[in-house]
């Protein structure tokens, strides 16, 4: 008789994403403040959006370039790579700089290289998402439909990322890279199986 | 335009943190999450497989039993997730006698199981069990997703044993342009994968599914959870789904090797080139009535991948049911409960 497997909810996952949301809020606040000041001074909405969205983009880009500096913020767009690395770790290949014991070193270097390529694609999709978000905010302003809450802004950010990520996902480059990533991981294992 | 002032945003973030703290306590007090609610009895077992019969909900169920063949991926309790989200309940209420194959959790002992084991041994033994129990020449078969593909293979090889075939969200043409899973599998060295791990680890399947929509599935979903922290029922519903999503059995190595290469990479099912054991699967041998149920917003099995069956099966009584929803919603949404089991039941009872 089959026994059900215990797969309890991981509350750490919830807390991690909550911290990421809070970090998003912290980044958005100064942007919103500067934007509103510009508008109160009678500035042009489109120009103000362009001007003040740039620092926000730069902050998010910096967080992704240097995830250690602000990991909660970086997680906003390294979520796919993080999930991949957690998966690889659960299969005996942790996300360390040095080759784990029991792995082939040349294959490990190749795997690191492919992960770098993967991150480049993800970063590009994330940058495109910020451009799209700026565009959508402009469209909403033109339509007289302001974003009312921080959560709405976050949801818009998610929607834009899903859209640009989805385009990347469907592209030939991603299909090939996804295969290379898994194949490179597999090549790290020496014959005989998974390292301890 | 951005409406909220920084002060409003501050207040929103403060409330979020308060609800998060309260909700974390609520979550810890919810206790175990139950799935699979209807009473059922094990009527046949073989290796890790268990064949369950759901207790009928009418005095005299239909004499031809219905066998549900679920996918090897994920667990079949999705068909009977909870009291008010149970496709099986709907089928029972309509008077059907429902059986379901639970494949169990393959382990290292199962790495050499092939598709022939699954189709010609396990499914066939279940079909034989039902034919004998109900004294029927042929039974009704309902295949779900990958289980639908296996059901197509079985039915093509044993058409005399199947009276009616229902396929649900079943891929048939694996190379339609919108097939994301094929797109992701196409460049994977399947031999290296299986030779390395033996069985395909369930974690890799989880990653693949999450990677289709990571910002929603690994991020926003958890932020939104804060909104239902004060609704114990909604919270339990969420946790049931969460349990199902991450309850991913490993896949028996050799069976996965053939399925990934022959179905996903080489699209052999529609080419009549799939070999199950010594036998070739020809979908035109499926000549009994067929109902093909697909979800119009399915991102895992695009409608075109399912609807291809119309061109390849040999049935003169072929029908389609389009459900307005996605790959998961077709089992668990409120609309699905209202629409899908009654439609399948009516179609079966008329035949």
Image: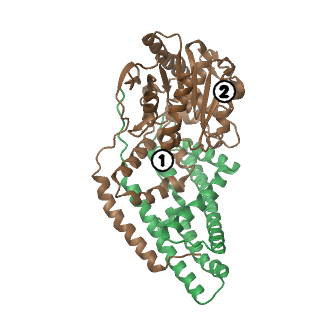
Chain colours: A green, B brown
In the structure shown, which secondary structural element does the residue marked by tag 1 occupy?
helix
- Placement of A4 over or under B30, stated as above or below: above
Q: Residue, x 51% and y 79% (percent of image)?
A: A30
Q: Is any part of residue B301 visible from this angle?
A: yes
Helix, strand or loop status at disc 2: helix
Q: Nearer the viewer, mark 2 or mark 1?
A: 2
- Label 1 crowd (10 A; few <14 / some 14-19 / many >=20): many
Whether labels 2 and 1 share one chain: no
Residue B301 coordinates in the image, percent (x, y): 61, 39
Give the residue number, with chain letter if any, for mark 2: B269
Q: Is residue A156 above or below residue B178?
A: below
- Please give left or right for residue B36 compared with residue B197 in the image: left
Q: A112 or B200, which is in the foreground?
A: B200
Give the residue displayed 30% in from the left and 44% down from the top.
B32
What is the number of the mark on residue B5? none
Q: CA distance from mark 2 to mark 1?
A: 31 Å
Q: Is B272 positioned to the left or the right of B40 in the image?
A: right
Residue A12 rendering spot, x and y as whole percentages: 37, 56
Q: Is residue A17 above or below residue B11?
A: above
Quick one: A188 or B340, which is closer to the camera?
B340
Task: Identify the residue at horizontal 59%, vertical 19% (top origin).
Answer: B155
Question: How far across and how far down the image is residue B250, in percent?
Answer: 46, 35
Query: Callout 2: 10 Å neighbours few (<14), some, many (20+)?
Result: many
Residue B218 at x, y = what percent? Answer: 49, 54
Q: Chain of mark 2?
A: B
In this view of the protein, can residue B333 be seen by the observer?
no
- Which residue matches tag 1? A87
Q: Quadrant of the C terminus of chain A?
A: top left
């Amino acid at each position: 008789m089959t026994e059900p497997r215990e797969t309890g909810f991981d509350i750490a996952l919830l807390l991690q994403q909550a911290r990421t949301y809070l970090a998003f809020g912290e980044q958005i606040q100064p942007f919103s403040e500067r934007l509103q000041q510009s508008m109160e001074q009678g500035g042009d909405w489109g120009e103000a959006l362009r001007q003040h969205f740039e620092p926000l983009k730069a902050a998010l880009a910096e967080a992704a370039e240097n995830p250690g500096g602000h990991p909660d913020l970086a997680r906003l767009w390294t979520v796919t790579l993080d999930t991949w690395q957690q998966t690889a770790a659960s299969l005996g290949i942790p996300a360390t700089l040095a080759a784990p014991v029991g792995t082939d070193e040349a294959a490990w270097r190749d795997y690191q290289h492919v992960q770098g390529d993967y991150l480049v694609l993800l970063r590009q999709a994330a940058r495109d998402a910020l451009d799209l978000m700026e565009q959508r905010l402009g469209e909403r302003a033109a339509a007289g439909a302001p974003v009312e809450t921080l959560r709405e802004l976050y949801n818009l950010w998610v929607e834009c990322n899903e859209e640009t990520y989805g385009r990347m996902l469907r592209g030939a480059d991603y299909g090939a890279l996804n295969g290379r990533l898994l194949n490179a991981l597999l090549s790290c294992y020496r014959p005989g199986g998974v390292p301890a | 335009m951005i409406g909220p002032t920084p002060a409003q945003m501050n207040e929103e973030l403060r409330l979020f943190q308060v609800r998060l703290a309260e909700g974390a306590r609520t979550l810890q007090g919810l206790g175990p999450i139950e799935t699979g609610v209807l009473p059922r009895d094990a009527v046949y077992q073989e290796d890790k497989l268990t064949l369950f019969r759901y207790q009928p909900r009418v005095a005299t169920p239909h004499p031809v039993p219905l066998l549900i063949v679920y996918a090897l991926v994920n667990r079949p309790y999705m068909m009977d997730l909870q009291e008010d989200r149970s496709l099986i309940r709907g089928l029972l209420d309509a008077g059907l006698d429902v059986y379901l194959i639970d494949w169990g959790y393959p382990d290292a002992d199962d790495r050499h199981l092939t598709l022939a084991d699954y189709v010609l041994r396990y499914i066939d033994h279940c079909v034989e069990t039902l034919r004998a129990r109900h004294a029927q020449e042929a039974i009704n078969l309902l295949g779900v997703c990958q289980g639908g593909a296996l059901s197509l293979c079985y039915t093509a090889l044993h058409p005399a044993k199947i009276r009616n075939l229902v396929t649900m969200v079943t891929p048939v043409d694996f190379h339609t342009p919108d097939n994301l899973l094929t797109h992701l599998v196409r460049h994977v060295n399947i031999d290296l994968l299986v030779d390395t791990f033996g069985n395909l680890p369930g974690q890799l399947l989880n990653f693949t599914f999450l990677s289709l929509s990571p910002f929603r599935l690994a991020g926003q979903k958890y932020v939104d959870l804060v909104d239902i922290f004060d609704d114990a029922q909604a919270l339990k519903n969420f946790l049931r789904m969460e349990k199902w999503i991450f309850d991913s059995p490993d896949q028996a190595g050799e069976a996965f090797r053939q399925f990934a290469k022959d179905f996903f990479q080489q699209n052999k099912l529609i080419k009549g080139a799939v070999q199950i054991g010594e036998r070739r699967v020809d979908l035109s041998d499926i000549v009994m009535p067929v109902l093909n149920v697909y979800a119009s917003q399915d991102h895992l099995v695009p409608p075109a991948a399912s609807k291809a069956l119309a061109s390849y099966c040999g049935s003169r009584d072929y029908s389609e049911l389009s459900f307005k929803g996605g790959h998961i919603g077709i089992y668990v949404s409120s609309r699905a409960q209202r629409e899908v089991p009654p439609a399948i039941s009516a179609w079966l009872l008329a035949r």
